[in-house]
Protein backbone atom coordinates (compact mmCIF):
# COMPACT_ATOMS: atom_id res chain seq x y z
CA UNK A 1 0.00 0.00 0.00
CA UNK A 2 1.34 3.43 -0.87
CA UNK A 3 1.83 5.70 2.16
CA UNK A 4 -0.60 8.36 0.91
CA UNK A 5 -3.47 5.85 0.63
CA UNK A 6 -3.60 5.23 4.39
CA UNK A 7 -6.42 6.75 6.48
CA UNK A 8 -6.26 10.38 7.50
CA UNK A 9 -4.81 11.49 10.82
CA UNK A 10 -6.77 13.07 13.67
CA UNK A 11 -5.10 14.47 16.77
CA UNK A 12 -7.52 13.47 19.52
CA UNK A 13 -8.67 16.58 21.42
CA UNK A 14 -7.74 16.59 25.11
CA UNK A 15 -11.29 17.64 25.99
CA UNK A 16 -12.82 14.53 24.42
CA UNK A 17 -13.16 12.06 27.29
CA UNK A 18 -16.43 10.43 26.23
CA UNK A 19 -15.89 7.13 24.32
CA UNK A 20 -19.11 7.85 22.40
CA UNK A 21 -17.21 10.46 20.38
CA UNK A 22 -15.34 7.61 18.69
CA UNK A 23 -18.58 7.04 16.79
CA UNK A 24 -18.32 10.53 15.27
CA UNK A 25 -14.85 9.75 13.91
CA UNK A 26 -15.67 6.19 12.86
CA UNK A 27 -17.84 7.41 10.00
CA UNK A 28 -15.11 9.79 8.79
CA UNK A 29 -11.99 9.34 6.60
CA UNK A 30 -9.79 9.90 9.66
CA UNK A 31 -8.82 6.37 10.59
CA UNK A 32 -5.60 7.05 12.53
CA UNK A 33 -5.88 8.64 15.98
CA UNK A 34 -2.91 10.45 17.48
CA UNK A 35 -2.77 10.95 21.25
CA UNK A 36 -0.13 13.54 22.24
CA UNK A 37 -0.46 12.36 25.85
CA UNK A 38 -1.25 8.97 27.35
CA UNK A 39 -4.37 7.32 25.98
CA UNK A 40 -7.35 7.93 28.35
CA UNK A 41 -8.29 4.66 30.02
CA UNK A 42 -11.97 4.92 29.14
CA UNK A 43 -11.14 5.31 25.45
CA UNK A 44 -8.15 2.97 25.13
CA UNK A 45 -9.85 -0.36 24.42
CA UNK A 46 -12.54 0.83 21.95
CA UNK A 47 -10.07 3.14 20.19
CA UNK A 48 -7.53 0.36 19.60
CA UNK A 49 -10.26 -1.99 18.41
CA UNK A 50 -11.60 0.41 15.79
CA UNK A 51 -8.68 2.64 14.76
CA UNK A 52 -4.97 2.78 14.17
CA UNK A 53 -3.75 4.40 17.40
CA UNK A 54 -0.45 6.21 17.92
CA UNK A 55 0.45 7.40 21.42
CA UNK A 56 2.95 10.20 21.98
CA UNK A 57 4.19 10.48 18.37
CA UNK A 58 7.92 11.16 18.23
CA UNK A 59 7.84 14.38 16.22
CA UNK A 60 11.27 15.70 15.23
CA UNK A 61 12.69 18.73 13.50
CA UNK A 62 13.55 17.91 9.90
CA UNK A 63 17.17 19.01 10.42
CA UNK A 64 17.55 16.40 13.20
CA UNK A 65 16.40 13.40 11.17
CA UNK A 66 19.06 10.83 10.31
CA UNK A 67 17.92 10.26 6.73
CA UNK A 68 19.84 7.02 6.00
CA UNK A 69 18.09 5.49 9.02
CA UNK A 70 14.80 7.40 8.97
CA UNK A 71 11.88 5.73 10.74
CA UNK A 72 8.59 4.80 9.08
CA UNK A 73 6.57 6.93 9.34
CA UNK A 74 8.81 9.98 9.10
CA UNK A 75 7.41 12.37 11.72
CA UNK A 76 8.26 16.00 10.88
CA UNK A 77 7.21 18.21 13.76
CA UNK A 78 8.52 21.61 12.66
CA UNK A 79 6.24 22.28 9.73
CA UNK A 80 4.71 25.72 9.27
CA UNK A 81 1.14 26.84 8.87
CA UNK A 82 0.83 27.36 5.09
CA UNK A 83 0.09 31.01 4.36
CA UNK A 84 1.49 34.27 3.12
CA UNK A 85 4.31 35.44 5.37
CA UNK A 86 3.21 38.19 7.75
CA UNK A 87 5.18 41.19 8.85
CA UNK A 88 3.79 42.03 12.26
CA UNK A 89 0.17 41.39 11.35
CA UNK A 90 -2.22 43.97 9.94
CA UNK A 91 -2.51 44.41 6.22
CA UNK A 92 1.19 44.05 5.37
CA UNK A 93 3.11 41.01 4.20
CA UNK A 94 6.74 39.98 4.29
CA UNK A 95 8.47 39.82 0.90
CA UNK A 96 11.28 37.54 -0.24
CA UNK A 97 14.34 38.46 -2.32
CA UNK A 98 12.22 38.27 -5.47
CA UNK A 99 9.96 41.07 -4.25
CA UNK A 100 7.03 38.64 -4.27
CA UNK A 101 5.26 37.86 -0.98
CA UNK A 102 7.16 35.36 1.14
CA UNK A 103 5.27 32.09 1.50
CA UNK A 104 5.21 29.82 4.50
CA UNK A 105 5.16 26.47 2.71
CA UNK A 106 5.84 22.82 3.57
CA UNK A 107 5.99 21.23 0.13
CA UNK A 108 9.77 21.24 -0.09
CA UNK A 109 10.16 19.55 3.32
CA UNK A 110 7.68 16.83 2.34
CA UNK A 111 9.27 16.22 -1.06
CA UNK A 112 12.72 16.05 0.53
CA UNK A 113 11.47 13.48 3.05
CA UNK A 114 9.80 11.39 0.37
CA UNK A 115 12.97 11.33 -1.73
CA UNK A 116 15.36 10.62 1.15
CA UNK A 117 13.13 8.03 2.85
CA UNK A 118 11.47 6.31 -0.14
CA UNK A 119 8.58 4.02 0.70
CA UNK A 120 8.00 5.53 4.15
CA UNK A 121 4.91 7.42 5.19
CA UNK A 122 5.53 11.11 5.79
CA UNK A 123 3.57 12.94 8.47
CA UNK A 124 3.96 16.65 9.11
CA UNK A 125 2.47 18.94 11.73
CA UNK A 126 2.74 22.48 13.02
CA UNK A 127 1.24 24.58 15.76
CA UNK A 128 -2.19 25.96 15.03
CA UNK A 129 -2.37 29.51 13.66
CA UNK A 130 -3.22 32.41 15.91
CA UNK A 131 -6.95 32.80 16.58
CA UNK A 132 -7.53 29.26 15.34
CA UNK A 133 -10.90 29.19 17.10
CA UNK A 134 -12.11 31.91 14.75
CA UNK A 135 -10.66 30.37 11.58
CA UNK A 136 -12.99 28.99 8.96
CA UNK A 137 -12.73 25.43 7.71
CA UNK A 138 -11.12 26.51 4.42
CA UNK A 139 -7.92 27.49 6.25
CA UNK A 140 -7.58 23.96 7.62
CA UNK A 141 -8.66 22.44 4.31
CA UNK A 142 -5.81 24.27 2.57
CA UNK A 143 -3.27 22.90 5.04
CA UNK A 144 -4.51 19.38 4.30
CA UNK A 145 -4.45 19.98 0.54
CA UNK A 146 -0.85 21.14 0.71
CA UNK A 147 0.25 18.02 2.58
CA UNK A 148 -1.72 15.60 0.40
CA UNK A 149 -0.63 17.26 -2.86
CA UNK A 150 2.97 16.55 -1.90
CA UNK A 151 2.27 13.01 -0.72
CA UNK A 152 2.14 13.44 3.06
CA UNK A 153 -0.48 13.29 5.79
CA UNK A 154 -1.14 16.18 8.15
CA UNK A 155 -2.98 15.53 11.43
CA UNK A 156 -6.21 17.43 11.80
CA UNK A 157 -5.87 19.34 15.08
CA UNK A 158 -9.25 20.73 16.04
CA UNK A 159 -9.28 24.22 17.58
CA UNK A 160 -10.34 24.07 21.22
CA UNK A 161 -13.65 25.85 20.62
CA UNK A 162 -14.53 23.72 17.60
CA UNK A 163 -13.71 20.49 19.46
CA UNK A 164 -15.93 21.46 22.39
CA UNK A 165 -18.77 22.57 20.12
CA UNK A 166 -18.55 19.43 18.02
CA UNK A 167 -18.77 17.24 21.12
CA UNK A 168 -21.87 19.21 22.17
CA UNK A 169 -23.56 18.71 18.79
CA UNK A 170 -23.28 22.33 17.64
CA UNK A 171 -24.51 22.78 14.04
CA UNK A 172 -21.73 25.17 12.99
CA UNK A 173 -19.03 22.86 14.33
CA UNK A 174 -20.69 19.91 12.60
CA UNK A 175 -20.61 21.82 9.30
CA UNK A 176 -16.93 22.68 9.91
CA UNK A 177 -16.19 18.97 10.54
CA UNK A 178 -18.05 17.81 7.42
CA UNK A 179 -16.09 20.25 5.27
CA UNK A 180 -12.78 18.79 6.46
CA UNK A 181 -14.05 15.25 6.05
CA UNK A 182 -15.11 16.06 2.49
CA UNK A 183 -11.65 17.34 1.57
CA UNK A 184 -9.89 14.34 3.10
CA UNK A 185 -12.28 11.98 1.30
CA UNK A 186 -11.57 13.78 -1.99
CA UNK A 187 -7.88 13.12 -1.55
CA UNK A 188 -8.45 9.50 -0.53
CA UNK A 189 -10.14 8.99 -3.89
CA UNK A 190 -6.99 10.33 -5.58
CA UNK A 191 -4.41 8.43 -3.56
CA UNK A 192 -2.61 7.36 -6.74
CA UNK A 193 -1.69 10.97 -7.48
CA UNK A 194 0.15 11.27 -4.21
CA UNK A 195 2.44 8.37 -5.10
CA UNK A 196 3.50 9.81 -8.47
CA UNK A 197 7.15 10.95 -8.47
CA UNK A 198 8.27 14.49 -9.14
CA UNK A 199 8.75 15.34 -12.81
CA UNK A 200 12.06 17.18 -12.91
CA UNK A 201 15.37 17.21 -14.74
CA UNK A 202 17.35 18.44 -11.72
CA UNK A 203 18.81 16.25 -8.98
CA UNK A 204 20.10 17.72 -5.72
CA UNK A 205 22.68 15.50 -4.03
CA UNK A 206 23.70 15.92 -0.39
CA UNK A 207 23.97 13.99 2.85
CA UNK A 208 21.70 16.68 4.38
CA UNK A 209 23.68 16.52 7.61
CA UNK A 210 26.16 18.60 9.60
CA UNK A 211 27.52 21.64 7.74
CA UNK A 212 25.72 20.54 4.57
CA UNK A 213 22.25 20.50 6.11
CA UNK A 214 21.45 24.20 5.97
CA UNK A 215 22.66 25.02 2.43
CA UNK A 216 21.11 21.85 1.00
CA UNK A 217 17.74 22.31 2.71
CA UNK A 218 17.58 26.05 1.97
CA UNK A 219 18.40 25.38 -1.66
CA UNK A 220 15.43 23.02 -1.89
CA UNK A 221 13.21 25.56 -0.16
CA UNK A 222 14.19 28.48 -2.39
CA UNK A 223 14.22 26.45 -5.60
CA UNK A 224 10.64 25.38 -4.84
CA UNK A 225 9.79 29.05 -4.25
CA UNK A 226 11.03 29.70 -7.83
CA UNK A 227 8.70 26.91 -9.02
CA UNK A 228 11.82 24.93 -9.94
CA UNK A 229 11.04 21.28 -9.25
CA UNK A 230 13.82 18.92 -8.17
CA UNK A 231 14.55 15.42 -6.91
CA UNK A 232 16.79 14.91 -3.86
CA UNK A 233 19.20 12.03 -3.24
CA UNK A 234 21.79 10.94 -0.71
CA UNK A 235 25.27 10.50 -2.30
CA UNK A 236 25.26 6.73 -1.90
CA UNK A 237 21.96 6.43 -3.77
CA UNK A 238 23.10 8.18 -6.97
CA UNK A 239 23.27 5.79 -9.91
CA UNK A 240 22.77 5.73 -13.66
CA UNK A 241 19.10 4.81 -13.39
CA UNK A 242 18.31 7.86 -11.27
CA UNK A 243 20.26 10.19 -13.52
CA UNK A 244 18.68 8.93 -16.73
CA UNK A 245 16.88 11.84 -18.38
CA UNK A 246 18.33 14.43 -15.98
CA UNK A 247 19.82 17.66 -17.30
CA UNK A 248 21.66 18.84 -14.18
CA UNK A 249 22.95 17.72 -10.79
CA UNK A 250 23.65 20.12 -7.93
CA UNK A 251 26.14 18.51 -5.54
CA UNK A 252 25.93 20.63 -2.40
CA UNK A 253 28.34 18.93 -0.01
CA UNK A 254 31.82 20.07 0.95
CA UNK A 255 33.29 16.55 0.80
CA UNK A 256 35.36 15.88 -2.35
CA UNK A 257 33.77 13.68 -4.98
CA UNK A 258 35.32 10.24 -4.96
CA UNK A 259 34.62 6.56 -5.45
CA UNK A 260 31.32 5.41 -7.03
CA UNK A 261 29.73 8.87 -6.81
CA UNK A 262 32.57 10.47 -8.77
CA UNK A 263 32.37 7.69 -11.34
CA UNK A 264 28.62 8.13 -11.77
CA UNK A 265 28.86 11.91 -12.13
CA UNK A 266 31.76 11.70 -14.56
CA UNK A 267 29.64 9.45 -16.76
CA UNK A 268 26.67 11.81 -16.43
CA UNK A 269 28.66 14.90 -17.44
CA UNK A 270 30.51 13.07 -20.22
CA UNK A 271 27.16 12.31 -21.86
CA UNK A 272 26.09 15.98 -21.82
CA UNK A 273 24.90 16.71 -18.29
CA UNK A 274 25.65 19.73 -16.09
CA UNK A 275 27.20 19.38 -12.64
CA UNK A 276 27.14 22.34 -10.24
CA UNK A 277 29.34 22.00 -7.16
CA UNK A 278 31.97 23.63 -4.96
CA UNK A 279 35.42 24.00 -6.49
CA UNK A 280 36.96 21.90 -3.72
CA UNK A 281 34.62 19.00 -4.52
CA UNK A 282 36.40 18.27 -7.83
CA UNK A 283 39.93 17.75 -6.54
CA UNK A 284 39.99 14.17 -7.82
CA UNK A 285 38.34 14.96 -11.17
CA UNK A 286 40.75 14.67 -14.10
CA UNK A 287 40.37 16.00 -17.63
CA UNK A 288 38.41 19.20 -16.98
CA UNK A 289 39.08 21.98 -19.51
CA UNK A 290 38.09 25.67 -19.36
CA UNK A 291 34.78 26.37 -21.12
CA UNK A 292 35.40 29.92 -22.30
CA UNK A 293 33.45 32.90 -21.01
CA UNK A 294 33.26 33.10 -17.27
CA UNK A 295 30.50 33.57 -14.72
CA UNK A 296 30.82 36.01 -11.80
CA UNK A 297 30.37 33.21 -9.27
CA UNK A 298 31.35 30.07 -11.19
CA UNK A 299 34.28 28.73 -13.16
CA UNK A 300 32.83 26.83 -16.12
CA UNK A 301 34.64 23.71 -17.32
CA UNK A 302 34.12 21.22 -20.14
CA UNK A 303 34.16 17.46 -19.78
CA UNK A 304 33.08 15.28 -22.67
CA UNK A 305 29.79 16.63 -24.00
CA UNK A 306 28.86 18.30 -20.72
CA UNK A 307 29.90 21.03 -18.30
CA UNK A 308 30.99 21.41 -14.70
CA UNK A 309 30.22 24.70 -12.93
CA UNK A 310 32.60 25.19 -10.00
CA UNK A 311 31.48 27.69 -7.37
CA UNK A 312 34.25 30.16 -6.55
CA UNK A 313 32.99 30.54 -2.97
CA UNK A 314 31.07 28.50 -0.40
CA UNK A 315 27.28 28.47 -0.59
CA UNK A 316 26.98 31.80 1.23
CA UNK A 317 23.59 32.79 -0.19
CA UNK A 318 21.07 29.96 -0.78
CA UNK A 319 18.84 32.30 -2.77
CA UNK A 320 21.63 33.10 -5.25
CA UNK A 321 22.51 29.41 -5.31
CA UNK A 322 18.97 28.47 -6.39
CA UNK A 323 18.92 31.26 -8.96
CA UNK A 324 22.32 30.34 -10.40
CA UNK A 325 21.56 26.63 -10.68
CA UNK A 326 18.28 27.40 -12.43
CA UNK A 327 19.92 29.73 -14.95
CA UNK A 328 22.97 27.50 -15.51
CA UNK A 329 20.66 24.56 -16.18
CA UNK A 330 18.51 26.80 -18.46
CA UNK A 331 14.78 27.27 -18.29
CA UNK A 332 14.42 25.15 -21.41
CA UNK A 333 14.72 22.19 -19.04
CA UNK A 334 11.77 23.31 -16.89
CA UNK A 335 9.11 20.61 -17.09
CA UNK A 336 6.49 23.33 -16.63
CA UNK A 337 6.56 27.10 -16.26
CA UNK A 338 4.03 29.27 -14.48
CA UNK A 339 3.62 32.84 -15.69
CA UNK A 340 2.34 35.53 -13.28
CA UNK A 341 2.23 33.08 -10.35
CA UNK A 342 1.92 35.67 -7.58
CA UNK A 343 1.30 33.60 -4.44
CA UNK A 344 0.78 30.33 -6.35
CA UNK A 345 3.32 27.50 -6.12
CA UNK A 346 3.25 24.62 -8.59
CA UNK A 347 4.76 21.14 -8.49
CA UNK A 348 4.71 18.68 -11.43
CA UNK A 349 4.50 14.91 -11.00
CA UNK A 350 4.47 12.09 -13.55
CA UNK A 351 2.32 8.96 -13.84
CA UNK A 352 4.22 5.65 -13.74
CA UNK A 353 3.55 5.06 -17.46
CA UNK A 354 4.87 8.57 -18.24
CA UNK A 355 1.75 9.39 -20.25
CA UNK A 356 0.20 11.85 -17.80
CA UNK A 357 1.71 14.97 -16.29
CA UNK A 358 -0.09 16.31 -13.23
CA UNK A 359 0.60 19.80 -11.91
CA UNK A 360 -0.42 20.63 -8.35
CA UNK A 361 -1.23 24.33 -7.88
CA UNK A 362 -1.49 25.80 -4.37
CA UNK A 363 -2.60 29.37 -3.79
CA UNK A 364 -1.15 30.63 -0.50
CA UNK A 365 -3.17 33.85 -0.51
CA UNK A 366 -6.40 31.76 -0.56
CA UNK A 367 -7.89 34.33 -2.92
CA UNK A 368 -8.35 33.89 -6.64
CA UNK A 369 -5.76 35.82 -8.63
CA UNK A 370 -6.98 39.05 -10.23
CA UNK A 371 -4.43 38.69 -13.03
CA UNK A 372 -3.94 36.12 -15.80
CA UNK A 373 -2.01 33.01 -14.75
CA UNK A 374 -0.69 30.73 -17.48
CA UNK A 375 0.81 27.25 -17.27
CA UNK A 376 3.26 26.26 -20.01
CA UNK A 377 4.89 22.95 -20.85
CA UNK A 378 7.26 21.97 -23.65
CA UNK A 379 5.79 18.47 -23.84
CA UNK A 380 3.06 17.71 -26.39
CA UNK A 381 -0.38 17.69 -24.75
CA UNK A 382 -3.35 15.82 -26.24
CA UNK A 383 -5.89 16.77 -23.58
CA UNK A 384 -6.01 18.48 -20.20
CA UNK A 385 -8.38 18.28 -17.25
CA UNK A 386 -8.77 20.60 -14.29
CA UNK A 387 -9.87 19.35 -10.86
CA UNK A 388 -10.30 20.85 -7.42
CA UNK A 389 -12.20 19.87 -4.28
CA UNK A 390 -15.89 20.69 -4.45
CA UNK A 391 -15.97 21.19 -8.24
CA UNK A 392 -16.72 18.87 -11.12
CA UNK A 393 -13.87 17.62 -13.27
CA UNK A 394 -13.79 19.43 -16.59
CA UNK A 395 -11.69 19.94 -19.68
CA UNK A 396 -9.10 22.72 -19.77
CA UNK A 397 -8.43 24.70 -22.92
CA UNK A 398 -5.04 24.14 -24.56
CA UNK A 399 -3.36 26.85 -26.57
CA UNK A 400 -0.46 25.74 -28.74
CA UNK A 401 2.36 28.26 -28.96
CA UNK A 402 5.78 28.07 -30.57
CA UNK A 403 7.69 25.34 -28.79
CA UNK A 404 5.02 24.32 -26.32
CA UNK A 405 1.47 24.27 -25.01
CA UNK A 406 -0.19 26.79 -22.69
CA UNK A 407 -3.21 26.52 -20.42
CA UNK A 408 -4.96 29.51 -18.88
CA UNK A 409 -5.55 28.89 -15.18
CA UNK A 410 -8.95 30.07 -13.99
CA UNK A 411 -8.93 31.88 -10.64
CA UNK A 412 -9.05 29.48 -7.68
CA UNK A 413 -8.89 30.09 -3.96
CA UNK A 414 -6.80 27.25 -2.52
CA UNK A 415 -5.94 24.17 -4.60
CA UNK A 416 -6.23 23.18 -8.24
CA UNK A 417 -4.81 20.29 -10.28
CA UNK A 418 -4.13 20.23 -14.01
CA UNK A 419 -3.74 16.75 -15.50
CA UNK A 420 -2.30 16.58 -19.00
CA UNK A 421 -2.24 13.60 -21.30
CA UNK A 422 0.56 13.12 -23.81
CA UNK A 423 3.98 11.58 -24.41
CA UNK A 424 6.04 13.32 -21.76
CA UNK A 425 9.33 11.93 -23.13
CA UNK A 426 8.80 13.54 -26.53
CA UNK A 427 10.02 16.97 -25.35
CA UNK A 428 13.52 15.74 -24.45
Image: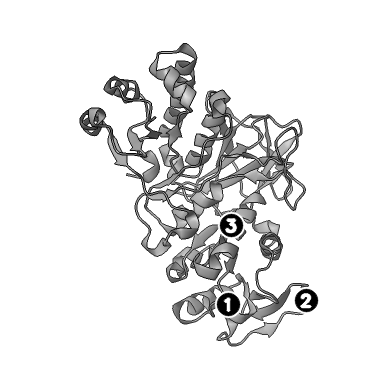
Q: Quadrant of residue 170?
A: top left
Q: Earlier in the sequence, mark 3 or mark 2?
A: 3
Rendered residue at 69%/59% (across/down)? 319
Rendered residue at 47%/26% (across/down)? 160
Q: Position of residue 245 (x, y in %)?
A: 54, 62
Q: Looking at the image, can residue 388 be seen?
A: no
Comparing marks 3 and 1, which lies closer to the viewer? 3
Crowd class of label 1 (few under 14; some 14 to 19; many from 20; radius 10 Å): some
Q: Quadrant of residue 42?
A: top left
Crowd class of label 2 (few under 14; some 14 to 19; many from 20; radius 10 Å): few
Question: How many angstroms separate mark 3 from mark 1 (CA)?
Answer: 26 Å
Quadrant of the drawing holding the C terminus: bottom right
Q: Position of residue 269 (x, y in %)?
A: 58, 74
Crowd class of label 3 (few under 14; some 14 to 19; many from 20; radius 10 Å): many
Rendered position, 46 above or below 110: above
Quadrant of the drawing holding the N terminus: top left
Residue tagged by mark 2?
294
Residue tagged by mark 3?
220
Q: Earlier in the sequence, mark 3 or mark 1?
A: 3
Residue tagged by mark 1?
270
The reply to whether the C-beta atoms of the residues labelled 3 and 2 are less than 8 Å apart is no
Question: How many angstroms separate mark 3 from mark 2 (CA)?
Answer: 26 Å
Amino acid sequence: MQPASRPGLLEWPASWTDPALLGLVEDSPFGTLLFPQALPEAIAAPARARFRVVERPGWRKHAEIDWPRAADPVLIGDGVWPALGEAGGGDTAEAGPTGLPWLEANGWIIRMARDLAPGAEVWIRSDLPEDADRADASLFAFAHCEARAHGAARPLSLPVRIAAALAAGNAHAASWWRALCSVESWWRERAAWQAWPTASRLWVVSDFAGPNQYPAAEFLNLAARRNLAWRAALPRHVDGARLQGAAAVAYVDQAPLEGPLLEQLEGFVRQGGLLVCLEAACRAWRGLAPAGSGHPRFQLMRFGKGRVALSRTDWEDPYLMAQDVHLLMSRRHDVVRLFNPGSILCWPVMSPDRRRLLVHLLNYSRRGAAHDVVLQTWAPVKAALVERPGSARRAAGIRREAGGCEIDIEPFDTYCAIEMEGNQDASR
